[in-house]
Amino acid sequence: MNHSASELFAIRSEDEALAETAVQLLPAIGRALFAALSDIGTAHGLTPAQVKVLLQLGARGQMTVGEIAAGLACSMPAASELVDRLVDAGHLVRASDPTDRRRVLIDATPASAHIAAELHALRQAQMRDALGRLAPEERPVFITSLQALAAALTAGVDASDPPCPAGAPLPRGIRS
């Protein structure tokens, strides 16, 4: 399909306007997502980074420190420090992998698994609310759009990024 120069300019201008609208929305979305998780985390004495560890374990089950570090896109020492603090606080337990005693698996305690389930339920409620604001035929497009955004934000992000401080929110992209 061939477009004239004026049609291409109009398409580019519309795309730029849409991109600018999205740029304006991202901070509000980020603040709202962070605030909701922070409220639950604070109620349980958890930092934002610790909340992200519980979310990972809630979604994936037992993990190694290396897998946690990869999921948070931070260094092994930073992830190890997070895990140590959560173990010391009684939120996590360490166990030897029964199939490979050299591997140490990290798991949430039952009380912390409940916190992770609470966090997950909050995220589900947020998504149900967002989907409920859309017409049924718009909902798949919304999910496709979120997938495209996640892919764009995480492109090139890996665990070799600078380490994340143990108590700080993670720096960029989608981390958990």
Image (tube, rainbow, N blue to C red):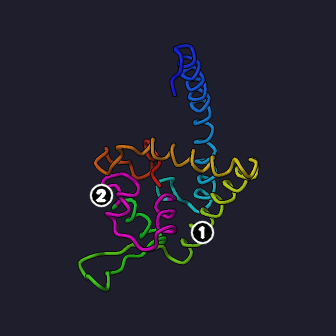
Magenta stretch mostly in which secondary structure?
A: helix
User: Splitting the image into 4 quarters, where does residue 39 fall?
Assistant: bottom right
Which is more toward the observer, 129 or 110? 129
Above/below status of 45 relative to 152: below
| Distance (Cα) linking label 2 and label 1 | 25 Å
User: Splitting the image into 4 quarters, where does residue 86 fall?
Assistant: bottom left
Per the image, is 71 magenta?
Answer: yes
Indicate the secondary structure of the residue bearing disc 1. Answer: helix
Region in magenta: 51-79
Tell me: 175 left or right of 16. left
Q: Which residue is mark 1?
A: 117
Report crowding for label 2: few under 14, some 14 to 19, many 20 or more residues within 10 A (C-alpha).
Answer: many
Which numbered marker is on residue 175? none
Which is more toward the observer, 11 or 121? 11
Residue 5: image location, x then y, percent: 52, 14
Q: Which residue is mark 2?
A: 76
